[in-house]
Image (tube, grey):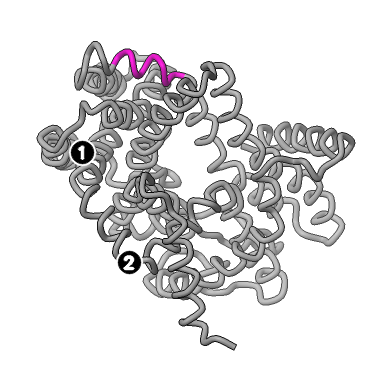
C-alpha cells in the first residue's frame, strides 16, 4: 500500500497533467479562496447560546469581542467572489455564443446549475424538521438551524440576478469603461449619504434597499471589465490604494461600523444592504486579486499539491456553500443534547477562550462537511438518477421549507 503522502502526490500530479493549458488557474485559485472564506467566516463569526430548556440560539462573538471585527475584513471576500463570477460569466457567454447558442439557453444552464443544490438542501431540511421534532429537539433549535441554513442561500439569488445582467454589464463596460463601476459606487455613496446624513430621520427606511443592486453589482462589473481587458495593472493599483484609503476614511472619519457582517443589537450594518464600506473593501480586494493573478497562476502551475485542493474546492463549490452551516449544526445539536454547554460550541461566544475552542473545532466541522458532501454531492450534478416522482417530492418539500424559513427569518 502506498504511503498517504505518496498517494496524494500521485493524485496531484495526475490532476495537474489532465488540466488543460488554457485553464486559468489563478481564477480558480481566487474562487477557491473566496469560497473557503464563507464557511470559515460563518464558523468563526457565528456561535450559539444555550437556553435553560436546552435550545440553541444564534449569537456572535462580535457582540462581546469587538476587536475581532478586522477578522471580518479578511473573511468577507464577496468582492473577490463577484469579481471572479463576472469574469467567468463573460467568458462562458462568449463560449456559448461561439458554439451557436443564445443568451436564453446560456442563462437557463447557469440557473439550473446554481438552483439544483439549493433545491436539494431545502428539500432535505424540509424532511428533517419533523424528524428533529420527533427526536425531541427543541423547536427554537430547529428555528435557529433553519435561519442558519437560509442565511447563505440569498447570495445565490443575488448571484443569479447579476448573471442575468451579464450582457448589459458587457455593454456598459464597452461604452463607459471604468466609469461603469464608478457610477455604481457613486450611487451607493449617495444612498449612504441619504440614510446616514443629518436628514436621516426624514428618509424612509426602504431607501437603503436601493443599494442592493449597485452594491453587489460593483464587484461583478469589475470582473466584466477584467474579462474585457479594461482592468489592467494601473487600474488595479488605483482600486487597491484608493479602496484602502476610502476604507480608512469611512471607518475613522465617518464612523462606519467596523464589522463587515451584522452584529446583534447594532443599529447599523454594512452588508444588509451593502454600504460604501463594502465597496471600498471590495475595491481593495479586487485590486489585489488582479495584481496577484499572474504570480498566483505561476505558483499553482509549479506546485501540483497546491493545485489539487483548488480543484477539489471548485468541484465542491455548491456543496460547501449550501451545507457548511448544516455541518456546524450536526455537531452542535447532538453536542447540546449530550453535553450541554460546550466551550466553543454551545457556550456563549464572549471570551478569548471561546475563540481558541472554536478554532480547535474547525477541523471537526470540516470533517463533518466532507461527510455530508459525500452524500449530497449528487444534488450538484444532473438529476438523472432521480425519477419524476422523486423530483416532484423534492420540489414540494423545498417549497414547504422555503415557506417555513421565510416565516422564521
* Location of the C terminus (image quadrant): top right
Question: Percent from the top left, x then y, of residue 166?
Answer: 42, 21
Q: In the image, is residue 98 part of the stretch drawn in magenta?
A: no
Residue 303 — which label? 2
Query: Disc 2 or 1, which lies upstream in sequence?
Result: 1
Residue at the image point whose x is 40% and y is 22% from the top: 213
Left or right of 200 on screen, residue 366: right
Residue 74 in sight from this viewpoint: yes
Magenta-drawn stretch, dominant element (helix, strand or loop): helix
Q: Secondary structure at mark 2?
A: loop
Question: Is residue 183 or residue 298 the one in the foreground?
Answer: 298
Residue at the image point whose x is 48% and y is 59% from the top: 43
* Residue identified by numbered label 1: 255
Q: Which residues are magenta?
A: 165-172
Question: Percent from the top left, x then y, of residue 16?
Answer: 42, 61
Left or right of 359 on screen, residue 137: right
For residue 324, above or below residue 209: below
* Location of the N terminus (image quadrant): bottom right
Question: Percent from the top left, x then y, of residue 367?
Answer: 58, 69
Left or right of 151 on screen, residue 263: left
Q: Quadrant of residue 231?
A: top left
Q: In the image, is residue 168 part of the stretch drawn in magenta?
A: yes
Mark 2 Cα within 10 Å, few/some/many (few <14, many 20+)? few
- Residue at the far right: name it: 389
Question: Is residue 325 or residue 300 the one in the foreground?
Answer: 300
Residue 263 — which label? none
Amino acid at each position: 500500500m502506498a504511503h498517504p503522502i505518496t498517494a496524494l502526490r500521485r493524485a496531484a500530479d495526475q490532476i495537474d497533467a489532465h488540466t488543460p493549458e488554457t485553464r486559468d488557474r489563478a481564477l480558480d485559485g481566487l474562487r477557491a479562496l473566496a469560497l473557503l472564506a464563507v464557511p470559515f467566516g460563518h464558523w468563526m463569526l457565528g456561535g450559539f447560546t444555550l437556553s435553560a430548556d436546552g435550545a440553541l440560539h444564534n449569537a456572535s462573538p462580535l457582540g462581546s469581542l469587538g476587536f475581532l471585527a478586522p477578522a471580518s475584513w479578511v473573511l468577507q471576500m464577496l468582492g473577490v467572489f463577484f469579481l471572479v463570477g463576472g469574469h467567468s460569466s463573460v467568458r462562458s457567454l462568449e463560449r456559448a455564443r461561439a458554439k451557436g447558442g443564445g443568451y436564453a439557453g446560456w442563462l437557463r444552464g447557469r440557473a439550473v446549475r446554481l438552483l439544483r443544490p439549493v433545491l436539494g438542501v431545502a428539500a432535505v431540511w424540509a424532511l428533517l424538521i419533523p424528524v428533529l421534532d420527533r427526536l425531541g429537539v427543541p423547536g427554537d433549535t430547529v428555528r435557529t438551524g433553519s435561519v442558519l441554513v437560509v442565511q447563505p442561500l440569498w447570495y445565490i439569488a443575488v448571484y443569479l440576478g447579476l448573471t442575468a445582467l451579464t450582457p448589459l454589464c458587457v455593454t456598459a463596460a464597452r461604452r463607459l469603461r471604468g466609469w461603469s463601476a464608478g457610477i455604481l459606487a457613486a450611487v451607493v455613496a449617495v444612498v449612504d449619504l441619504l440614510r446616514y446624513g443629518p436628514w436621516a430621520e426624514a428618509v424612509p427606511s426602504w431607501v437603503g434597499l436601493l443599494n442592493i443592486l449597485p452594491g453587489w453589482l460593483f464587484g461583478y462589473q469589475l470582473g466584466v471589465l477584467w474579462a474585457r481587458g479594461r482592468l489592467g495593472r494601473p487600474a488595479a493599483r488605483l482600486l487597491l490604494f484608493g479602496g484602502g484609503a476610502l476604507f480608512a476614511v469611512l471607518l475613522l472619519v465617518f464612523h462606519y461600523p467596523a464589522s463587515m457582517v451584522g452584529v446583534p443589537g447594532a443599529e447599523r450594518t454594512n452588508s444588509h444592504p451593502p454600504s460604501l464600506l463594502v465597496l471600498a473593501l471590495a475595491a481593495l480586494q479586487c485590486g489585489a486579486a488582479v495584481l496577484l493573478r499572474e504570480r498566483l497562476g505561476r505558483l499553482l502551475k509549479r506546485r501540483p499539491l497546491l493545485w489539487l485542493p483548488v480543484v477539489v474546492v471548485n468541484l465542491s463549490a455548491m456543496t460547501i456553500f449550501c451545507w457548511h452551516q448544516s455541518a456546524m449544526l450536526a455537531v452542535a445539536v447532538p453536542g447540546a443534547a449530550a453535553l450541554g454547554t460546550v466551550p466553543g460550541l454551545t457556550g456563549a461566544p464572549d471570551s478569548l477562550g471561546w475563540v481558541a475552542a472554536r478554532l480547535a473545532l474547525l477541523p471537526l466541522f470540516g470533517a463533518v462537511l466532507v461527510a455530508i458532501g459525500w452524500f449530497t454531492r449528487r444534488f450538484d450534478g444532473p438529476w438523472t438518477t432521480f425519477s419524476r416522482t422523486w423530483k416532484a417530492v423534492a420540489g414540494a418539500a423545498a417549497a414547504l421549507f422555503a415557506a417555513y424559513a421565510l416565516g422564521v427569518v
